[in-house]
Amino acid sequence: MLLVLVSAAAYALFASVHYRWNWSGVWKYRQQFGIGWLTTLGISLAAMLMSVLFGFVLMLGRRARWEPVRMFSGAVVEIVRGSPLLVQLLVGYYIVANALRIDMPLLVGLLLLGAFHAAYLAEIFRGAVESIGASQLEAARAVGFDRQQTYRFVIIPQALRRALPGTTGQLVSLLKDSSLLSVIGIEELVQKVKIMNSASYTALEGYVPLALAYLVVTLPLSHLARRLEGRFAYET
């Protein structure tokens, strides 16, 4: 029912716009559109994996016993979260990567995108871990668990369920933020659409499929997260 209502509203909206639609240009460059979509998916999946792993490491670093490790991890999180992704992409590629003579925009963009969202995921993971009651930790110590076993058998299984909603939202944001990689010359989906519109002399025809292409990925991702939340929805 919601899909029908949204479709009807979208049809009424576009019908009221006095614009001469020309879909032949979009169809002509459909192959380039598909290449851009696959590029966006590949970059996003790799950046998701990197951000989750790096975010988990930063979370452990912020909870480490050594003060220098905690300070370093906290500084990384605050610095990355304190500036926009667009600025980090421009500085990271045109200044840092150029100074190091790294002429690989895809690799640099992937690392910067993953690191940016890893800082946010680190705080999501830390909040989930610190929400575990002290009685759980005392019970783990009472049965003889060391620090590693406590994380493996007590903290992580419970924190995983609590971190799922925030993690899903952050990964969806990562997918959408991949469109900013066009500023460093990566021809992902948004850049391909811009090129397609310029070549076919169209304006809106490329952006409607662009929005649908992102929805095709973000909606199943959100649905999968809800399924996982239901699977882990048990009383601790």
Image (tube, helix red, strand yellow):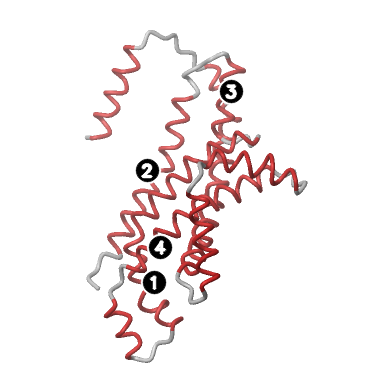
Residue type at numbered disc 4: Phe
Instruction: Evaluate if marks 4 and 3 touch, with contact meaning CB atoms under 8 Å apart.
Output: no
Instruction: Evaluate if marks 1 and 3 touch, with contact meaning CB atoms under 8 Å apart.
Output: no
Q: Which of the two discs, 3 and 2, labels the residue nearer the N terminus?
A: 3
On the image, the x and y values in percent for residue 141 come to 35, 87
- What residue sits 33% from the left and 70% below the top? 158
Disc 4 versus disc 2: distance between alpha carbons? 23 Å
Q: Which of the two discs, 4 and 2, labels the residue nearer the N terminus?
A: 4
- What residue sits 53% from the left and 42% below the top? 85
Q: Nearer the viewer, residue 127 or 226?
A: 127
On the image, the x and y values in percent for residue 8 come to 27, 24
- What residue sits 53% from the left and 47% below the top? 44
Label 3, secondary structure: give it.
helix
Closer to us: mark 2 or mark 1? 1
On the image, the x and y values in percent for residue 135 come to 27, 80
Q: Which mark is residue 215?
A: none
Q: Which mark is residue 125?
A: 4
Disc 1 versus disc 3: distance between alpha carbons? 46 Å
Disc 4 versus disc 3: distance between alpha carbons? 40 Å
Residue type at numbered disc 1: Ile
Q: Which of the two discs, 1 and 3, labels the residue nearer the N terminus?
A: 1
Disc 3 versus disc 2: distance between alpha carbons? 25 Å
Q: Which of the two discs, 2 and 1, labels the residue nearer the N terminus?
A: 1
- What residue sits 51% from the left and 56% below the top? 51
